[in-house]
Amino acid sequence: MRALILVDLQNDFVAGGALAVTDGDAVVEVANRLQPLFDLVIATQDWHPSNHQSFAAAHPGRTAGDMIDLHGFPQVLWPPHCVQGTPGAEFVGDLDTQSIRHVVRKGTDPEIDSYSGFFDNGRRKKTELTSLLKAAGADEVWVMGLATDYCVKFTVLDAIEQGFRTVLVADGCRAVNLKPGDGLAAIEEMRRSGVRIVESSDG
Ligand code: VGL
Ligand code: ZN
């Protein structure tokens, strides 16, 4: 059985949002088109407390885009985004949500970031994602969403590691591209790790 994982299709990652990904809105149509083709749809939601330590504002003298060491892990500093309960954290208005069976929230611990839908960045805590997929009998997961070079990449790498046949929907993703080429490098890294890369028309 195959499942679709929609990564962080939230207002803050599209036009007008705090951490807008270029052309991020374009993937919502892809998500809506793919959902009816899957037995199970799960969405992840970046869900930070307002004092999250990935926010540049939590580090006086630092600005968004800086890299720091956060409790032993390299951490990119971001503008405050996806703060719990704010409009920026809500799913994009045009996203069809009625087929989303589960929402997995991540990034709730202020002391550690969580790009992957499966684990925090330190791999200390696991979300419910693996058990939800296994309980439903999923053996193949298709992944799409925002952003290619962060949450999509780490979700894909962990899906492979958790034993799922993993497929990346290339046209369903857009990258932050903090550095030019980051999105392409992320796709290359996912490819080397064994993901199958398709277009949504292959769904
Ligand atoms: C993401 C940066 C910070 C993402 C989330 O969804 O890719 N990127 N938080
Ligand atoms: Zn975040």
Image: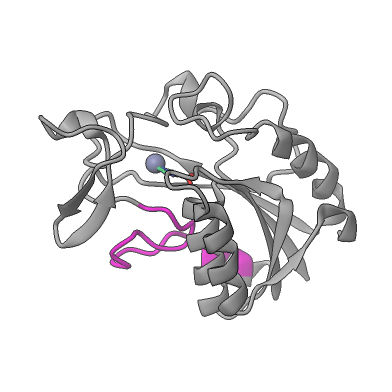
Q: 135 left or right of 4?
A: left
Q: 53 left or right of 81?
A: left
Residue at point 45%, 31% (across, down): 19
Q: 89 left or right of 33?
A: left
Q: Position of residue 36 (x, y in %)?
A: 86, 48
- Ligand 2 sits in which quadrant? top left
Q: Position of residue 87 (x, y in %)?
A: 49, 19
Q: Is residue 119 above or below residue 177?
A: below
State the scheme by which the image is colored: one colour
Q: Is residue 145 above or below residue 56?
A: below
Residue in front for this viewpoint, 174 or 1: 174
Residue at point 47%, 29% (across, down): 89
Residue 168 appears anywhere in the view = yes
Magenta span contains residue 172: no
Q: Position of residue 9 (x, y in %)?
A: 60, 38
Please identify the quadrant where the C terminus is shown.
bottom right
Q: Which residues are magenta?
A: 114-133
Magenta span contains residue 128: yes
Residue at point 71%, 48% (across, down): 172
